[in-house]
Image (tube, coloured by chain):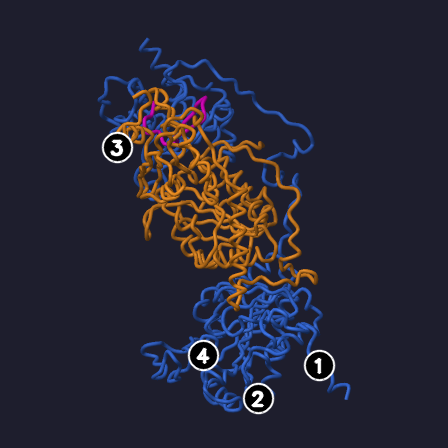
Amino acid sequence: MATRMLMKGNHAAVYGALLAGCEAYFGYPITPASEIAEGASLLFPKLGRTFIQAESEVGAINMVYGAAGCGKRVLTASSGPGVSLKQEGLSYCAGSALPCVVVDIMRGGPGLGNIGPEQGDYNQVVKGGGHGNYRTIVLAPNSCQEMCDLTMYAFELADRYRNPVFVLTDGVIGQMMEVVELPEPVENLPDKSDWAVMGTAGTRNLINSIYLAHDEMEWWNEQLRKKYELVQQKEVMFEEYMMDDAEYAVIGFGAASRVLRTTVDMARAEGTRLGLFRPITLFPFPKKEIAALPGRGVKGILTVEMNTGQMVDDVNLALCGTDVRSGYYGRYGGNVPSAREVLDRIAELGWRSGS
Amino acid sequence: MSKASKVLRKPSSFMEIYKHKPGPEKDRTHYCPGCGHGIIHKLIAEALEDMEITERTVMISPVGCSVFLYYYFNTGNLQVAHGRAPAVATAASRANPDSVVISYQGDGDLAAIGGNNILQAANRGENIAVVFVNNAIYGMTGGQMAPTTLPGQKTTTSPYGRNPANEGYPLKMVEILNCLDAPTYLARTSLHDVPNMRKTRQAIRKAIQNVKDKKGFSLVEVLSMCPSQWRTDGPAAQKWILEKMIPTFPLGVVRDLSDEREPIARPVPVMEPTEVKRLLGLISDEEVAGASASRDFKRREVAPQHANPSIRVAGFGGQGVLSIGVALANVGMEYGYNVSWLPSYGPEMRGGTANCSVKIQEATVGAVEATEPTVVIAMNRPSMERFEKILVPGGLLIYNSTLIEIEPTRGDISVVAAPITKLADDLGNTKVQSMVAVGAYIGATGLFDLEDVVSMLPRLFPGKKELLDLNERAVRAGYDHVVAAARSRG
C-alpha cells in the first residue's frame, strides 16, 4: 500500500478526479482514452460514486450537464472524434455556466484518423469548438503526475469560474506510465446551493442558457467575456527549463514538451544556449510571458507541435511587434518528433550560440 | 361551492408570477389557444402538489414548445439541449436520488433527435418520469414534419403529405419501448375529450408516483392538440386526434409493473478523506491503525554503461513484452530512480508486434520514447532486425536465441544471447518468458539486485501462489543463465 504508484497517465486522471471529490463519471470508450472510462468503472463504484457508460459521446456530455447542474463535481473523457461530438453539450455547459471537467487524450485526425498520439485538437478545444461566444479553460499536462494534479486542479478552476475545464493531452501522456505521488483527498467541497438544482426546497434554481431578448443575450455574453478576461489575467501557468540565459527557445506542450526537454539537454551539451518554454494553460495562453522572451535575450523561438501548426498561431500573435525569429516544426499522423530531429531543425536554422 | 373554488385554484406547484418569462405578460402562458400543453402542465402541477413533492421535483425543459416549461413550475429547473432530456434527467436522478425528476418532451425531441437517449434511459430503468407530448408536428419551429406525423399529413416540410416511401412511417414510441425489459410503466393517453383527460391525469400521477417510490422508468405518451400548426381550431383538433391519430396510436396502459418492482437503491458517495484513501488502497488497514513496514531498496554500484538505461523491449504480441517493461519500471521506482514506460498501443498490440520504451534514470525523464536506446531486449527476429539498428554505439542487445536464429550484425555493441523461450518452456510454461527476460536483463547489467526483483513479484502479479513461484523461478533462470554464460566466457 502506498501513495506512490507507477501508473498510466489515463489512470492518474481518474485518481485525480476521485481525490478532488468528483462524484460522477459519464463516458464512452475511445482509444487512446479508454483507460479513463475503465479506471473510473473500477474505482468510482468502490467509493459509492456514479459511473455510467453512456449511450454516446453526446449522451455523456449531457449527463455531465445534468450532474453539474445538480451541483456535483463531474468528469468525462474522450479523444478527438468524441470531443467533436461533445462540442454542442460543451457550449450548453459554458452557456449555462456549469463547472465540469473534460479530459481529451488526442489521437490522429481528421476523420477517423488513427489512434496514434497527436495534438490536432488544439484549435477545437482551446478556441471553444462549439457554437457561440465561449471559452474553456485548458490545462495541458506533460507527465503522469500532472495528469493527476492538473485533473484535481481542473475541478477547482471549474468551480471557481463556473466553466468547463479541459485537461488536454496526447496519446503519449495518456498511455505512458510514470510514478505518481497521490495527493491528499480534498476535504471540503464548495457550496453550490445558491445556483445548483439539488432537489431541495432551497435549491429550486434554474439552469438555462436562453436569453430571448437581444440585449439580455448581449449582457450575458459580456459577463462571459469579462470572466474569460479575468481568467486570462489570473490563471496563466507555464514552466521554463534552462530559460534564464537562453539565446534560443523551443515552445511545446504535452508529449512534445518532453521531447523538447531532451533537445535542450542535447543542445546545451553542444554549447548552444537553448531553453524550453512550456505553456501549462493553453487558455489562458501565456501570451505576455512569450511576448517578453525577446526582451530577455531570446533571438529565435521554435514552436514544436504534434500537428500541422495550431498553437504556433498563438505564439506568433503573442510575438507580434517583436523582431524575434519564429519558426514551427511538427510531426503528426501519430508520429512523435524525436529530440534529435528537433535539434537538427535548430541547426538548419543556424541557431547556435557563439556563431 | 368550496369544492368548485378548489378546482379553479392555480396549483401551488406553479409559479405565482412567471418571473422568468420576458415581457409584461407574467400571468399567462406562452402557449396558443387550444394547445394541449397547458392541460398537461396543470395535471403535473396538481399531482406534485397533492403528493407534496414540489420542493424536491426537478423539471427538465427540452427544445420545442415546452422549452419554456421553466417559466411555470415552481420546482428546480434544467433547460437542456434538443433531445437530450433523458440523458440530463439520468444524471439529475443519479446526482440526487431523492429528487423527483420529470422529463417533459415533445415528439421531435424525444422520437427524432433524441431517439437514442430515450431508448437508453428507458433501458437503464432510470428513476424518472417522462411525459411525452405527441402532437404529430414540430410546433415551435413552425409546423415541420415530426417522426409521429401521420402518412399523408401535410406539414411545412411534407407539403405533399407525409409519404412513407420517402419519410417512413410514424414512430410508435410506447410500443418500441415496450420491447425493453427495464421500464416499469408505459401508457398512451389522449386529450381529445374529458374522460380521456381524466385517464391522462391518472397515468401522469402513476408515473410520478413511481418516481417518488423509486420504482424506475415510467413514460406517458399524451396525444395532444396543436391547433396552430394543424391550421385548425380547438374542437376540430380534438376531433382530428380521435379520428386520425388514435387509429395509428392506440390508447392504453401497455405495461404496469409498479407493484412488483422493488425500489431502486443508489449508492451513497464516500467523501471522507481517510475512508477514500482506504478504499482506493492508498493506505492499508494496518496503516490506518498506525503500523507500516516495507522492504528497503538500496541502489547498487552500476558499471557506467549500464547506468541510466534507455530500454526498448520488443517482440510478438503475447510474449509479455509490455510486462517486461512494467516490471523493470516498477523495480526502478522502488530504487528511487525517475522511471517512465511507454507502450506501443492499439491494433499493433492486438496481434502482430509489440514494443515498449522504458527509462530508468537519475535525472528527470524528458522524451519517453527510447529513440536512441542504450538497451534493446529483442524477443523475436523482426524486433531484433528493427531495433538493433537504433542502439547507441556501445549499447547492449539482449536477444532471445530460441526464436532468433540469426546473429546480430553490428560490431560496436555488446550482445547477450539467451534462450529465453526455451528456459520458460523448461519451467513448463512459455508465458513466463517475460520474467526470464527480466532476469536476463538484471544478470547482464547488475542494475538491480536479484532478491529485490523477486521481492517485487507479489505486487507485480497479485493472486495465485503457483504462478508467483513460477515467475520467481523464471526470473532466477534468466539471471542464472546470463551470469553463468558470462563466467564461462571468463
Q: CA distance from mark 1 to mark 2?
A: 22 Å
Please name the residue that numbered disc 3 is placed on.
Answer: B382
Residue bounds of the magenta highlight? B359-374
Q: Amino acid at mark 1?
A: Arg
Tell me, yes or no, if residue B337 can be seen here: yes
Q: CA distance from mark 1 to mark 3?
A: 83 Å
What is the residue that sits farthest to the right in this orientation? Answer: B2
Q: Nearer the viewer, mark 4 or mark 3?
A: 4
Pick whichever, A69 or A30, lies toward us.
A69
> Disc 1 vs disc 3: Cβ atoms closer than 8 Å?
no
In the rendered structure, find residue A28 and report the number of the disc placed on it.
Answer: none
Q: Colour of chain B?
A: blue
Please name the residue that numbered disc 4 is placed on.
Answer: B137
Q: Earlier in the sequence, mark 4 or mark 1?
A: 1
SS at mark 4? strand
Q: Amino acid at mark 4?
A: Ile
